[in-house]
Image: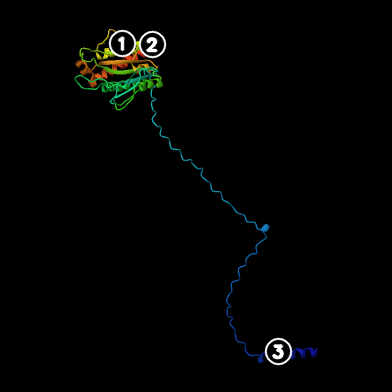
Amino acid sequence: MKKLWAICILLLLLAGCAGRDEAPVAEVVPTEAPVTAAPTEVPTALPEQQLTIDVVVTETAVPTPVPTPEPTPTLAPTDTPEPTPTPGPLEGFVIGLDPGHQRIYDPSQEPVAPGSRETKQKVAGGCRGVKSGVYEYEVNLNVGLLLRDMLEEAGATVVMTHDTLDVNISNIERAQMFNEANVDLGIRLHCNNGGSEKKYSGAFMIVPTENRTRFYEENVRAAATILAAYCEETGLTTRYKDGITYRSDQTGFNWCERPIINIEMGHLSNPAEDALLSDPAFQVKMARGLFNGIVRFFRPDLGSAVNE
């Protein structure tokens, strides 16, 4: 027991000595170390099959497109259909017109008929107004052009041997033009010269003699019909009893293989008729009279009421 107490006292003494020998410890104020930001951890990519991203798609309502209205077409004014023109009274007919003579005189010869030894001048000079001095070929062409226009307006096809004076076309060539065109009727336009006998007057028709044509009866009928209408329109009389005479020596007849007639529209050798035949206003009457006669010949069903 006494030993135990002795050990305790010894330990206490030793402890007291140790406390006095230690130097005082200075109070150390800890200095705050700078704070270093921890590195941001980059997440390690997951394997592809493990990467799942939930994307929430918010559907925005798309407005239904409103179609742009097509512009209303402006309707073109409806054209009133043109009425079907009524065919002219001479529709389908072919008329040949041969204004006699020309400015170019050609005295060279040609056969009067196919195979004939008899010859005549290719183109004679024609006559001239006793008072007016107008040339026959001028009157013939003026009337021919006026008549052509009237015939075409009525629907006819017109074949003219020439429409100007400065040509040189023989009588055979004129007849052949009618043959090639297959005319339904050829009309030769002339004025007459009674020579020194100024008393001769009036219009008349010449037709080929019966032995010179296969259209004899048709020619006579055409001549009579057209001459009557011509005199009715112009007021001229006829020179002969029935106004028709017959010739076998006209080259323009004998080479023509189609119906054909020749009108002598008046006498330039007669002073009174010369004044009429050279007058442009009267030439319109001459053409109108011929036209009326042609319509009556081809369209007798129309009577005398056509274009008068």
Q: Nearer the viewer, residue 188 or 52?
A: 188
Q: CA distance from mark 2 to mark 3?
A: 190 Å
From the viewer's perspective, is residue 283 above or below residue 238? below
Three-letter code, disc 3: Ala
Report the residue at 31% width, 11% height from top.
245
Of the image marks 1 and 2, the number of the one nearer the N terminus: 2
Seen from the viewer's position, the closer of residues 144 and 33 is 144
Residue 85 visible (yes or no): no
The percent position of residue 17, horizontal first and vertical second, equals 69, 92
Q: Quadrant of the C terminus?
A: top left
Residue type, label 2: Asn
Q: Nearer the viewer, residue 208 or 237?
A: 208
The residue beneath circle 2 is 211
Give residue 151's position: percent from left, percent from top: 34, 20
What number is the disc on residue 15? 3
* 3D distance between C-alphas at marks 1 and 2: 15 Å
First reached walking from the N terminus: tag 1 or tag 3 = 3
Whether residue 270 can be seen here: yes
**Mark 2: secondary structure:** helix
Q: What's the image's color scheme? A: rainbow
How crowded pointer 1 is (Cα within 10 Å; few <14, some 14-19, many 20+) is rated as: some
Q: Tell me the quadrant of the picture where the N terminus can be found.
A: bottom right
Give the residue type at disc 1.
Thr
Q: From the viewer's perspective, is the residue at label 2 or at label 3 nearer?
A: 2
> Residue tagged by mark 1?
245
Q: Quadrant of residue 75?
A: top left
Q: CA distance from mark 1 to mark 3?
A: 192 Å
